[in-house]
Image: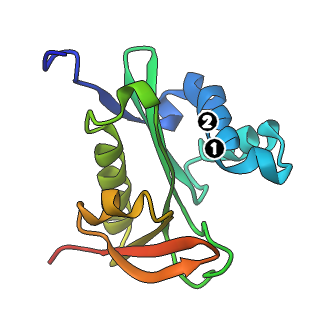
Amino acid sequence: MDSLERTFTLSEMSKTPAFIPTIAHRIWQAWWRDKGVLQSEIETKLRAALCPEAVPTAYVAHRGDTYLGSALLIESDFAARPHLTPWVAAVWTEEVHRREGIGTALVKRMAQLAFDSGFSRAYLCASDDNTPFYEKMGWKVLEYHVKQLNVLALDKPN
């Protein structure tokens, strides 16, 4: 794959609402289907992020009209740690586009949005398998195996 094929765009979801059904499906399938949550509930929450005054922010990675991945910045993503905020959440890259830098770009964009909003730290939770991906970007594990997930944090650079 040449460098031109590896380029992609990160856009605010509010500017690319056509991707909402796809994003909702990926989030639902990866994290909520087995918990009995309806895909339509996920889509409703994503549409709420289109309002400028809403707390969540979402970005989509795309190449033209082709969905490549997405990530959210939300107030809370882990009920076991409600006092921690904000959270980078629902980071997803389509399997055929993994290892192209898309997930890294999305995570970095979400963390920067948190810092630009006045937060000095951003959080996320990850499985043992996914933790090294975040550690390579400078995220530090705060706690291991909280409800089978690791809690990580990234501090705002000086």
Q: Position of residue 81 (x, y in %)?
A: 60, 82
Q: In the picture, residue 122 is in which quadrant?
A: bottom left
Q: Residue 148 versus residue 125: which sits nearer the camera?
A: 148
| Amino acid found under the numbered disc labelled 2 | Arg
Seen in the image, is 107 located left or right of residue 71? left
At label 1, counting other C-alpha atoms closer than 10 Å, the crowd grade (few under 14, some 14-19, many 20 or more) is: few
Query: How does the figure colour the protein chain or chains?
Result: rainbow
Seen in the image, is 10 located left or right of residue 2? right
The secondary element bearing badge 1 is classed as: helix
Please name the residue shown 79% across and 48% down the image.
34
Give me the disc on residue 142.
none
At label 2, counting other C-alpha atoms closer than 10 Å, the crowd grade (few under 14, some 14-19, many 20 or more) is: many
Q: Residue 105 versus residue 46: which sits nearer the camera?
A: 105
Q: Position of residue 46 (x, y in %)?
A: 65, 43
Q: Position of residue 29 (x, y in %)?
A: 68, 39
Give me the disc on residue 26.
2
Say whether residue 30 is visible: yes
| Amino acid found under the numbered disc labelled 1 | Ala
Please name the residue shown 23% across and 61% down the image.
136
Say whether residue 47 is visible: no
Please tell me whether mark 1 or mark 2 is closer to you in this view: 1
Relative height, residue 64 to residue 96 (above, below): above
Q: Position of residue 56 (x, y in %)?
A: 57, 55
Q: Are circles 1 and 2 on residues that touch, CB within 8 Å?
A: yes
Instruction: List the single residue furthest toward the front.
Output: 129
- How many marks the image carries: the answer is 2
The secondary element bearing badge 2 is classed as: helix
Please name the residue shown 56% across and 26% down the image.
19
Identify the residue position indicated by label 1 in the image: 30
Seen in the image, is 45 located left or right of residue 3? right
